[in-house]
Image (spheres, rainbow, N blue to C red):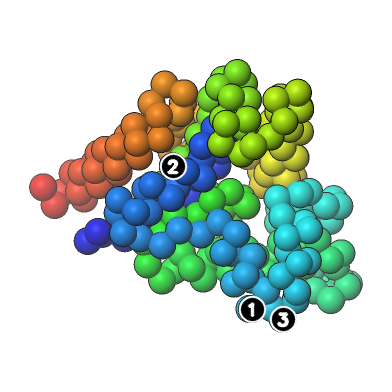
């Protein structure tokens, strides 16, 4: 891929968002980051990877919202990094890791508020993958091996956790179309169809940028 592009993929549980990310990575030949971010963040910080896994995409206290929104007097020295709640420390570390990998080359990043963390990045294309609950329950059973009697509850609880995490750490709303560059229904398009639509959308965005800059 000649021009750099950073794809972030938010997803409802059972929508196949991870599969879309992996398929897009394979088709474009660019790095894919999901749980890999936890490993990198652990290496960057010296914290145990298990700590990052335990709080992965889970909301914490109200402190970091104020910090992210600029309402907390961090510069005053009232509360330093080491005095912050552990969840908040880990989120900040992971945010720095996300910015680090995005600065290097084209890549795909799954979840973890990456679209918000990279907000304003000129190379960013944020995608949200969704599907009707019935389709997600079916995928959860067939692809993830979840008990059919518990699959719907698992889907809804995971969605709630992701939404709480995202809504807390950002000033945007998880799953709302205006939050993302592109929103796709995987039940209508399939995994490969979603990949094709993302690539086609990328081409359109690039063409529009060139026209806006007067380079065409």
Element class at badge 1: helix
Q: From the viewer's perspective, is residue 172 above or below residue 120?
A: above
Q: From the viewer's perspective, is residue 68 above or below residue 198?
A: below
Residue tagged by mark 1? 43
Can I make out residue 45 in this image? yes
The Cα atoms of the two marked residues, 1 and 3, are separated by 5 Å
Cβ–Cβ under 8 Å for marks 1 and 3? no
In the visual, does 27 lie left or right of 31?
left
Give the residue at x 15% y 49%: 214
Q: From the viewer's perspective, is residue 82 above or below residue 151?
A: below
The Cα atoms of the two marked residues, 2 and 3, are separated by 31 Å
The quarter of the image holding the N terminus is bottom left
Element class at badge 2: helix
Quadrant of the rendered structure where residue 98 is? bottom right
Give the residue at x 44% y 69%: 103
Crowd class of label 3 (few under 14; some 14 to 19; many from 20; radius 10 Å) = few
Percent position (x, y) of residue 18?
51, 45
Considering only order in the chain, which callout, 3 or 2, is on the residue closer to the N terminus?
Answer: 2
Residue tagged by mark 2? 20
Residue tagged by mark 3? 46
Considering only order in the chain, which callout, 2 or 1, is on the residue closer to the N terminus?
Answer: 2
């Amino acid at each position: 891929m000649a021009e750099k592009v950073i794809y972030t993929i938010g997803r409802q549980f059972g929508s196949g968002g991870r599969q879309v990310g992996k398929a897009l990575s394979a088709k474009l030949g660019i790095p894919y980051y999901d749980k890999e971010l936890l490993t990198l963040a652990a290496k960057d910080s010296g914290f145990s990877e298990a700590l990052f896994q335990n709080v992965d995409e889970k909301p914490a206290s109200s402190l970091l919202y104020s910090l992210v929104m600029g309402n907390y007097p961090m510069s005053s020295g009232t509360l330093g990094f080491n005095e912050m709640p552990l969840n908040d420390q880990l989120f900040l570390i992971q945010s720095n890791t996300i910015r680090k990998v995005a600065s290097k080359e084209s890549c795909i990043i799954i979840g973890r508020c990456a679209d918000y963390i990279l907000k304003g990045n000129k190379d960013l294309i944020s995608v949200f993958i969704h599907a009707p609950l019935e389709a997600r329950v079916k995928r959860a059973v067939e692809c993830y091996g979840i008990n059919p009697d518990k699959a719907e509850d698992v889907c809804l609880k995971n969605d709630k956790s992701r939404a709480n995490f995202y809504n807390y750490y950002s000033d945007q709303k998880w799953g709302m179309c205006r939050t993302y560059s592109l929103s796709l229904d995987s039940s209508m398009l399939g995994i490969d169809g979603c990949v094709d639509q993302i690539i086609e959308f990328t081409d359109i965005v690039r063409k529009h940028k060139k026209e806006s800059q007067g380079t065409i």
